[in-house]
Amino acid sequence: PDEEPETFSILSEDSSNSDGDVAPAVVYTPINGWVPDDTKPLYGLPGAVAPTGFFDPLGFAQKGISLADVKRNREAEVMHGRVAMLASVGYLAGEAVGGNGPLGVVGPANDQLQQVPLPAFILLTVAIAAAELKRATIGWIEPDFDKWLQ
């Protein structure tokens, strides 16, 4: 049987009206142990470290940003970081191979992408686009590992 996820209610300091009535609480479901708190910058998103704290030089985390925007920006940052790390490894691997690589690619890593045959380049582009589109359609859905094992 599926269990209901634990939820948390968060009331801000100014959640009551002039009659003293308390506004309904916003209910958040924890995401990997993080419970969004609308009284904190970026809803209390983990990752602020000393000495910079909430480092945001371009102002993406401006006051009034929605929780959905915070999640989307965080996902984009994580995905771009992963792509950059893989690209760095690929660049170093290309330099290490040096001689004749697969598909007849030779020379320094800066010149290798231009040497990839057009059909292979198209296949690579379609594969990357398919993976990105699939990821984008899933968004913030928690993975169901049981389905993967079936």
Image (tube, rainbow, N blue to C red):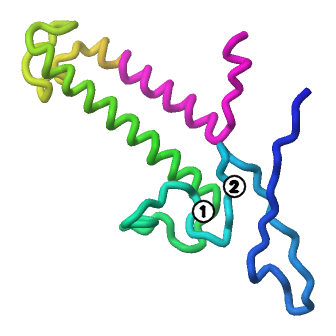
Q: Please identify the dominant SS of the magenta region.
A: helix
Numbered badge on residue 133: none
Q: Which residue is painted at 65% across and 51% down in the image?
A: 34
Q: Amino acid at mark 2?
A: Val
Coordinates of residue 97 in the picture (x, y in percent): 14, 14
Q: In the image, is residue 40 above or below residue 78?
A: below
80 lies left or right of 16: left
Horizontally, is 60 left or right of 21 in the view?
left
Query: Which residues make up the magenta segment?
Result: 123-150
* Cβ–Cβ under 8 Å for marks 1 and 2: yes
**Label 1: few (<14), some or many (≥20) within 10 Å?**
some
Looking at the image, which residue is at 79% across and 72% down? 11
Question: At label 1, which amino acid type do we have?
Answer: Gly
* Secondary structure under the numbered disc 2 in the rendered image: loop
Neighbours of disc 2 within 10 Å: few (<14), some (14-19), many (20+): some
Is 84 on the left-hand or right-hand side of 18? left
The residue singled out by tag 2 in the image is 35
